[in-house]
Every structure is written in structure tokens, then in C-alpha cells.
Amino acid sequence: MKGVFIWLLFLLLAFGTFALRLSFIYLFGKVDMPNGLRRALRFVPASVLAALVFPALVYSNGAFDFSFGNVRLLAGFGGALVAWRTKNLLWTIVAGMVLLWVLQALIAGVTL
Amino acid sequence: MNNRHRDFIAGARHSLPILVGVAPFAMICSVAAVSVGLTPFEAAGMSLIVFAGASQLAVLQLLSEGAPWVVMALTAWVINLRFTMYSAALAPYLQKEPLIRKAPFAYILSDQAFGVTMGRFVNDLPANPPWYFYGAATAVWVTWQAGAIAGALLGALVPARWGLDFAFPLSFMALMFAALKDRPAVIAAAVGGMSAILTKGLPYNLGLMLAALAGIGAGLLAESLTVEQAKGMTK
């Protein structure tokens, strides 16, 4: 996917995202947010983010790999501990990346 | 200096601590974009026009897996559904603004700007609430764009063997733990995550979206069961 097409994709993402942002700022007083929707939206971040994280850790090069040989799974557990304790984006990335590099060197023999 | 300017500056100043996290996240988004084959210009352009990091990272991941554009758009929109919550919460404070100002307000609405603004509004409403929001959101936006441009320029210098794509799940992880505020949210995350593992092989990378919906459903179910339980106890 290259050139013009990628910009069309960005515009599509941007347009939808802008509409979601403007939604109730614009509709205030005209339409109330339905109660069911309000309750469901609360679970969007936790659910979507977990759906992004879990497969990225247990699949290695496209194959299911739940073992000590999967360095990303191990580094992910370390990162999760830091994420849980600190709730901090930067510390989680730093800890997870350093752990990945160390484990890669120790287990897979890959150095930077 | 009138009230508007004072509230604008107060909003910008109060968002300073959070900017420390905004800049690196923006850089990561750009570095990730370059790592999946976008040019630095495209990477910075994506951050400028979409301006929603988590959805950008998800789209980049799908892009690298060769997902169809419909799936990429739907996935990004599902992730960004949370903005309607922010939009509804801010709406009462912005209702007197003309549409010509509401539109830019909406474009620069971010998780961080919302957090800073509502944190202040519930405790101590400023004289000009829209301008306070405007100040906070502008500070976040400027920092984000600066970080995105820096990341786009640096991205090409990062060798692939560093495995910087691992920063995707790590970023999502940090954001996820911040969202686990109660038991139903934890259940939503557990079900969403497990479903995503099970549906990984589905065509068109539809697994992510289906898993997200399963997680949301599980969260709702868990919440209604908790409410029932609480009702039972008060009887």
C-alpha cells in the first residue's frame, strides 16, 4: 500500500475519528447519549487494548508459542509487571525493551 | 490579560506534567510507522491528520500484516469510540461556542487533554471553561506533533534488529493497565485478550474487532451481575 492510497487511508481514519470527537460536542441538547451505549463505551479501552496485547505476546513469527523459548512473551510479562505497578507508558516501554534485549542475548544469542 | 487568556495559560500549564508522557508516545508512533515502511513524511503526516496514537499503532500493525483498508478503518474507529465519551462529558461546557470553534476543539481533543480538563472542572470550574480546555489541548497537540516529527526523522536511524516493533504491545499494555479500574474492566480485558488469541487466524484480520466486541460484552455482563449482587445484599 503506497503513495496516494496511504493518504486516502489516513484521511478515512482522520474523518471517522474527528466525527467521533465532535459527536456530542455538536449534538449537545439535540441528542442524548443512550444509556446502553454509555455503559458499553466504558469497556472499549480495556477490551481493545488487551486484544492488541495478548496475541502479540503468544504468537512468535506467526505461530502460537507459549513457552520459555518465546522471548517476547517473557519480556512481555516483565513489561506487564512494570505497567501494573507504575501505570506509566515510558517506564513500561523502557523496561520491556531492555528486558527483550537482555533475553535475546541470553536465550537466542542475538545482540544489538 | 483577560480571563480567556488566563484560563488558556492555566490549562496549558496544568498539562505540563502529562506532556512528559506525550512526547515519547508520539515519537514511538512515528518510529513504528517508519519501521513498517512508511516514509518520514507519511509518518509525521499520519500523526498530524489522525492525531490518535493508540489507533495509529493498531493500524500500522495491521498495515504490516497486509490487512484490507476496511478492517484498518473499522479497527481504528472502534479504538477511538472512547472519544464519544469525552465528547459527551465536555459538551455542556462548550455548548455556547460557535461551530467554527467547536470543530477545532474536537480535532485537538485527546485522552490527556480530557484528563487534565475534567480533573480541573469537577473540582474548581475556571471562569472560561472552553479556553481552559483549549489551552490544555493545544499544549498536548503541539507536544505530540513535535514528538511525531522528531520520531519520523529518527525512525530511519533505528536498525530492525533492535526489535522496536515490540514497543507496540508494550505501549498498549501500559494503556491497558491504566484502564483496568474495576473488576468488570478486568474481565473485559481478559475476555478481549483471550478471544484475540483464539481468533488470530480469521481472514481479513477481523479477529481484533470481534475480540474487542466480545470483551465489551463480557464487561457489560460482569457489571450487570455485580449490580444484581449489590441489590441482593441491600435487601
Image: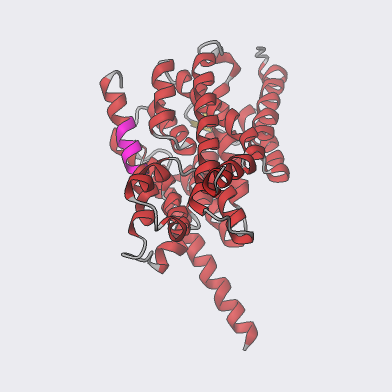
Give coordinates of residue B215: x percent, y percent: 48, 54
Nearest to the observer: residue A42 or residue B161: A42
Image-based side of A25 in relation to A12, left or right: right
Q: Is residue A49 above or below residue A105?
A: below
Residue most extreme to the bottom: B235
Residue drawn at x 58%, y 34% as measured from the top left: B22
- Residue B56 visible in the picture: yes
Give coordinates of residue B93: x percent, y percent: 47, 58
Task: Indicate whether residue B188 is drawn in magenta.
Answer: no
The secondary structure that most of the magenta stretch takes on is helix
Give coordinates of residue A55: x percent, y percent: 51, 38
Residue most extreme to the front: B1
Residue drawn at x 51%, y 71% as measured from the top left: B224
- Residue B193 visible in the picture: no
Q: Is residue B100 above or below residue A104?
A: below
Q: Quadrant of the N terminus of chain B?
A: top right
Q: Quadrant of residue A81?
A: top right
Q: How many marks?
A: 0
Q: Quadrant of residue B43?
A: top left
Instruction: Give the magenta part as a residue range.
Output: A10-17
Image-based side of B69 in relation to B1, left or right: left
Nearest to the observer: residue A15 or residue A110: A15
Give coordinates of residue B110: x percent, y percent: 49, 43
Q: Is residue B125 above or below residue B6?
A: below
